[in-house]
Amino acid sequence: MFLPVTLDGTSAQSLTGKEAKGTSISGQWRSRTGLVTRGADGKVIFLYGEVQPSVICSPLQVCDIELQAGEVVRDVLVGDAVRWKVEPATSGAPGGQAIHLIIKPTEPGLVTSMVVTTSRRTYHIQLKSHGTQYMARVGFEYPEDVSAQLSDINARLEASTIAGAGVPAEQLDFSYAVSGSASWRPTRVYSDGTRTYIQFPASIAARDAPVLFVVSGGQNRIVNYRMKSNMMIVDYAVDNAILVSGVGWGQEKITIRRGG
């Protein structure tokens, strides 16, 4: 039995509907134009996983594909292992070394694919050789790195933010004096200009929290406030206030005054 032969001498093969759909999806991914940016020292940066990167190399020149620091290469598979040479190299200090794949084509006009499996991910890369044009340095940007950077930034912002207020410490007014003696005596009082935050010892329970009276016009009046854990959040910029707990001889009272 003979298979039909095309004009270029190859055997013509028919594909099923599913096979044609699969090759079409793969072709769209391979041919899609992804994000390419410039990194340090002229490095070409691809966003990992967005598309299949197409790396252009040239005979008698070296293409350097740098992987993520600390990533361990398991296997390197090249479709045309005869006319494409791949050699490993490393950079960086021990413990955080980066693997480099040095790519060398033997002649121009070649197209092949390369699969690199590592301890963290799998790279699918298209290799093309050109007579004069090439990419000297290639690297990747990783989406998880961006997420880690955001997490680090958020952690540092939270570290510089006072509990309860949700704003940086330099934007708060801490010029409050607390006087009196009580088992629940506030550990800190501050204001963001709109609300006042009264922080109690961590051991305080909502049912043990004192009642707040704001002193205004020589009279004690109640304003809206709420407890959040050991923090009393007052919907008022307090100048003078009194905290009271208990009655009679067992009553405890604390005075709060802005500016001492």
Image (cartoon, rainbow, N blue to C red):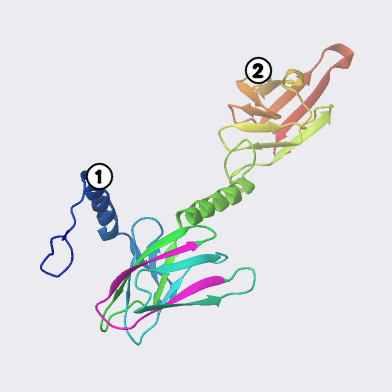
> Whole-percent x and y of residue 135?
35, 76
Q: How many marks?
A: 2
Image location of residue 104, percent across then percent down: 38, 80
Look at the numbered disc 1 and give the secondary structure of its residue: helix
Residue occupied by mark 1: 18
The magenta stretch is: 98-117
Q: Main secondary structure of the magenta part?
A: strand
Q: Is residue 70 above or below residue 81?
A: above
Quadrant assignment for the N terminus: bottom left
The front one of 201 and 17 is: 17
Q: Is residue 210 shown in magenta? A: no
Residue, x 32% and y 79% (percent of image)?
A: 134
Residue, disc 2:
221
227 with respect to 183 (left or right): left
Circle 2: is it few (<14), some (14-19), or many (20+) Cα within 10 Å?
few
Residue type pointed to by label 2: Arg
Assess whether residue 102 is covered by the magenta stretch.
yes
Residue 56 seen in the current view: yes
Q: Farthest residue to the front: give it.
A: 1
Amino acid type, mark 1: Lys
Q: Position of residue 17 (x, y in %)?
A: 21, 44
> SS class of the residue under badge 2?
strand
**In this rendering, does residue 68 appear at all?**
no
Q: Quadrant of residue 183?
A: top right
